[in-house]
Amino acid sequence: MSASFAQLGNDLYTGRRSVAVVAHRRRFYLGSLALFLVAVLGLATQGLNLGLEFRGGSEFRVATSSAPQDYEQTAREAVGAAEDQRGVNVTLVGTDTVRVQTERLSDTDSQSVRSALADAFEVPEEDVSATFIGPSWGASVSAQALRALVIFLVAVVLMLSIYFRNWKMAAAALFALAHDLAITVGIYALVGFEVSPATMIGFLTVLGYSLYDTVVVFDKVRENTNQAFANGRLTYAQAANLAVNQTMVRSINTTVIGLLPISAVLVVGSVFLGPGVLLDLSLVLFVGILVGAYSSIFIATPFLVTLRRKDAAVVELEKKALRHQAKVAKDAEHAAPVSGDAPVPAGALPSTPATREEGSTLTGRAVHEYARSGPRNQPKRTPRSKR
Amino acid sequence: MASAPRTVARRSLVALGVLALALGALLAGSVLWSDGQTTPKLGLDLEGGTQIILEPKTTGGQSVSAEQIEQARDIIVQRVDAGGVSGAEVTTQGDRNIVVSIPEIPSQAVRNAIKQSSQMQFRPVLAVTSGVPEPTETPSSSSSPTASGSASSSPTATASPAPSSSSTNNSALNEALTEDSPSPSTTASSSPSPSSSGDSDTPSDPTDLAWVTDKVQQAYQDLDCSDQKALDDLVDDPDKPLVTCSSDGSAKYILGPVAVSGDKISDATAGYQTNQQGTVTSTVEIALTFNSEGADEYADISRTMVGLEEPRNELATVLDSRVIVAPRFDSAIPNGRASITGGFTLESAKALADQLKFGALPLSFEEQSSVDISPTLGSEQLRYGFLAGLVGLLLVVVYSLGQYRMLGFVTISSILVAGLLTYLTITVLGWAQNYRLDMAGVTGLIVAIGFTADSFIVYFERVRDELREGRSLASAVETGWNRAKRTVLIADGVNLLAALVLYLLASSSVRGFAFTLGLTTVIDVLVVFWFTHPLLTLLTRVPFFRDGHRLSGLDPSRLGAKSMRYAGRGRFTPTPALRETEGSRA
């Protein structure tokens, strides 16, 4: 499998195989737009399932050695004995932790509920943890996170504009970022995952990750397009497309390696621990990294091409590159008997190299028969180790 | 020339070794000669305990300034210390919250004491004595000082009108009295029995000794200020007398009802006193200013009290029900500008002035959240967190070996080195900076495995790209590195930026995450530059890798290099003969 994966890597690198990401960008835009609409719809109809931290309330967790079958009844009775049944919500977390959420309780009430629960489940009182969240806590956390986000984005735009010396790259990266955020939030709303402050951390990290991924791809885009600007053989769109393809293997490897530990946390968290910082964080990271990997390949670079297609330099390059490619195609036509293939259509060159035959270069230029085995026929010598 | 990269590589490896050894030595030293420990300090959510997040608010309901937050923090620290809780930490969070972390689950009384609203009051002193309970003998009814040798420290200060006051007629007296307060070391006096002094059963003003009823007297006698829990169930009613201790526990008081409430202070500053001629003297004073309402009340009470005998001419300043200072009136203070002098250093005066300023700002503390984590739950979280981390690491190992063959071991050893450095740093920081690893931090570490591995992937993919272009391994590693390091730097830079912004701006639960994320990003850069790249450079000399063994992960034919002939910038020419063999292999 990995051999064919490495082969795929080679082909993507040389352009023998290629995914026409940039050419088909409208498709991806439409796909993302559809996803986005679904996300907005989910958000509008269902809203986010805000956790206790945002609503305010009290939560108790009882760590039993093994939760009894009738844990819900037991818990309700225990809470009811100490309290009126005020919006009590009992869930089993993992295999042996009972979670009881109630409305906001006063300190004394909270204390008595705690001991009642400890009695009911026959555990020492230390094994019952009590959490109280004031109603404004979540709002203040979100306000802080939002402020952090805005400052982060401004800083990132500055940093990337300076690094790439081109604000459009920063703009495209931000667009991919907004895309990721919208879709991740939408998925959260649709599936109804609980949003906790840890989820907010997760969202922020996802933004960092998405940006990181995009930056790696853009670095290659910059390298390829700079080369194209220098030699005028590829249009901006072709060079960018080649970059996406060349970094695709890396993108896949990175995403898989990034997701592996997170899925381990996700599985361990959901099976043994239940809702908590660990699970909330890993869940949002899992969703976000997937979306982020998608956007850095299929959205960011195409959007960059869309943004820059009217730039004077890019238009100029396109003319030059198409002229060059037409000339190459013409040369190939003259030398056609060698390949015996239909003339390669101009403009579709490196992006469809599957049609390229042996005896031609990557760009389709025909190579003379004598030159095919190398610059010059040198006596071959096997390496020392193979002798 | 050819050996230059390898020399550099060796140097880098040595440098990293030295860094790791230094960290290790620091850790060992902290364990041997200090109170360091070999494992990272754990946060409350892992260790068990209580975290209470309070937001101070003024009584008007508006938020408070950063400076006021610091003052509020000091108040809370005093309360927590007074509650007899050990190992508690009080920190400010951002510019609005105060986080109280207690490594145990505190009693309700301690909780209440921590979050009660802070209030300052001025109450006349009715009786004062040393902080421990008196001998059983009943106090004599005379109000003359008994010469008990108890050195009560607080009531040695005097209050007098500030020199800037317009009342010049009694300035001579003023000066004489405030110049050097003849601190009566015998301020400890017997408490008058109510029958002797009270001429009526309903006390008329706050200084009236009729407030000292039998019950009050009994409470006063029983009070032991050396016992930290003594005042836990104190009820502080402004209209009733108060039996309490000084804030350092050295003296105990019976105080009359509140004469002036603290929110009528408009300012309190500490500095050297200026005398009538306008020259600065060496006496440290606290200049206290009241607003107009406070000035009137203060004038009234000072007029009443200045004529009374020691210690009843002392007006105690009470913060959180404890006496912080009880200066004696030398004269009436008509204009609301008082000067407190006597035995202060500039520093202690500043601290006191800060405390007095609280009076201008009665804070209430709104509980934002309170989380109790039982130690059982905490350790369970940690255990599963570790389990998840190990499983994640194992998966990464398997995947990199599958993808990169022997080169995968370079990835794995790099991750291990990064892990070791992270562990050492966190543990040393736990000792030096009291850094505590919490659940969010552990999650950050696990997530970081992915980020760290990615730097290696970017690097290896670049090297492979160069191999595909037909370079030899040694030159592919050098060229690949030159291109990859830019990518690694900018990508890690973005990450670090995210971590920094999060750390500086977000709340404490986010901070742990941001910190580990930032730390591992820095360590990642360090490891890539000082370990992974040098290691790979050295490995290019090893025949197994140099000749592109099938399992090395750098096999040029597998990478398609031999089947492609590099024909100039970015162009490749497949060689017919080789393409056939390739076809047969596929």
Image (cartoon, helix red, strand yellow):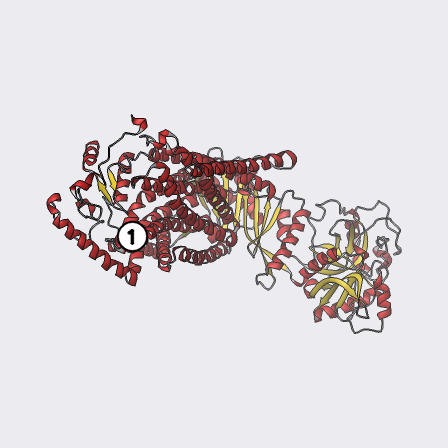
Chain identifier of the residue bearing label 1 in the image: A
- Quadrant in the picture for residue A13: top left
Mark 1, other Cα within 10 Å: few <14 / some 14–19 / many ≥20: many
Q: Is residue A41 visible?
A: yes
Q: Is residue A195 visible?
A: no
Q: Position of residue B353 (x, y in %)?
A: 71, 60
Q: Nearer the viewer, residue B225 or B453?
A: B453
- Horizontally, residue B372 falls left or right of residue A303, namely right
Q: Is residue A120 above or below residue B110?
A: above
- Quadrant in the picture for residue B172: bottom right
Q: Position of residue A51 (x, y in %)?
A: 44, 50
Q: Nearer the viewer, residue B325 or B422?
A: B422
Give the residue displayed 73% in from the left and 52% down from the top. B247
User: Which amino acid type is marked by label 1?
Assistant: Ala
Q: Secondary structure at mark 1?
A: helix
Q: Position of residue B209 (x, y in %)?
A: 82, 59
Q: How many marks?
A: 1
- Horizontally, residue A42 falls left or right of residue A353, namely right
Give the residue displayed 56% in from the left and 57% down from the top. B95
Q: Quadrant of the N terminus of chain A?
A: top left
Question: Which residue in the protein does label 1 denote?
Answer: A240
Q: Position of residue A189 (x, y in %)?
A: 36, 52
- Quadrant in the picture for residue A278: top left
Q: Residue furthest top?
A: A387
Q: Is residue B308 above or below residue B93?
A: below
- Horizontally, residue B428 falls left or right of residue A24, namely right
- Horizontally, residue A235 falls left or right of residue B296, namely left
Q: Quadrant of the C terminus of chain A?
A: top left
